[in-house]
């Protein structure tokens, strides 16, 4: 079961990076109705994949691998988790703006 959760965690992390890259590319061009819908879809993928990364990651920390004591005494893990939280908090504002487009897009 551990390899499956590791695979799922990495798959979600790659999907997250792909969604962020897609958003950056889509926002750089002219904003049309089609492009706005694509940005909303990419943002949804970003949110879902970030949630999967977080849930599966914590499942791995507390249920599998080396255990929570090992991970929460690891400076690189704490740094990585802190960076994840900071980026997640910074992404709230753009997500709220993108969601406000839904009323206009219908």
Image (spheres, rainbow, N blue to C red):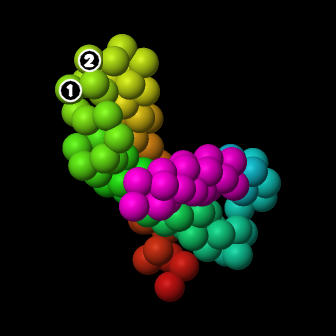
Disc 1 crowd, CA 10 A, few/some/many (<14, 14-19, 20+): few
Horizontal side, residue 55 vs residue 8: left or right: left
Label 1, secondary structure: give it: helix
Q: Name the disc covering residue 69, or none.
A: 1
Q: Residue at x 38, y 25 (%)?
A: 77
Q: Which residues are magenta?
A: 1-23
**Residue 16 sits inside the magenta stretch:** yes
Q: Quadrant of residue 22?
A: bottom right
State the residue in front, 62 or 19: 62
Horizontal side, residue 71 vs residue 45: left or right: left
Residue 29 coordinates in the image, percent (x, y): 79, 54
Q: Is residue 33 above or below residue 47?
A: below
Q: Residue at x 33, y 18 (%)?
A: 74
As drawn, the residue found furthest toward the bottom would be 106
Horizontal side, residue 3 vs residue 62: left or right: right
Q: Name the disc covering residue 73, or none.
A: 2
* Residue 66 can be seen, yes or no: yes
Q: Residue at x 35, y 41 (%)?
A: 65
**Residue 68 sits inside the magenta stretch:** no
Q: Name the disc covering residue 33, or none.
A: none
Label 2, secondary structure: give it: loop
Q: Is residue 36 above or below residue 6?
A: below
* Residue 49 can be seen, yes or no: no
Residue 39 coordinates in the image, percent (x, y): 61, 63
Which quadrant, please, contains the N terminus? bottom left
State the residue in front, 51 or 71: 71
State the residue in front, 16 or 58: 58
Q: CA distance from mark 1 to mark 2?
A: 6 Å
State the residue in front, 103 or 53: 53
Q: Residue at x 30, y 27 (%)?
A: 71
Secondary structure, magenta segment, majority class: helix
Disc 1 vs disc 2: Cβ atoms closer than 8 Å? Answer: yes
């Amino acid at each position: 079961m551990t390899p499956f959760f590791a695979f799922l965690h990495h798959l979600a992390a790659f999907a997250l990076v792909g969604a962020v890259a897609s958003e950056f590319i889509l926002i750089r061009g002219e904003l049309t109705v089609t492009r706005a819908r694509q940005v909303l879809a990419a943002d949804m993928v970003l949110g879902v994949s970030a949630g999967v990364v977080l849930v599966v990651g914590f499942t791995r920390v507390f249920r599998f691998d080396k255990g929570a004591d090992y991970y929460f005494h690891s400076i690189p893990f704490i740094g990585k988790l802190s960076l994840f939280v900071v980026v997640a908090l910074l992404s709230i504002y753009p997500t709220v703006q993108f969601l406000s487009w839904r009323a206009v897009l219908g």
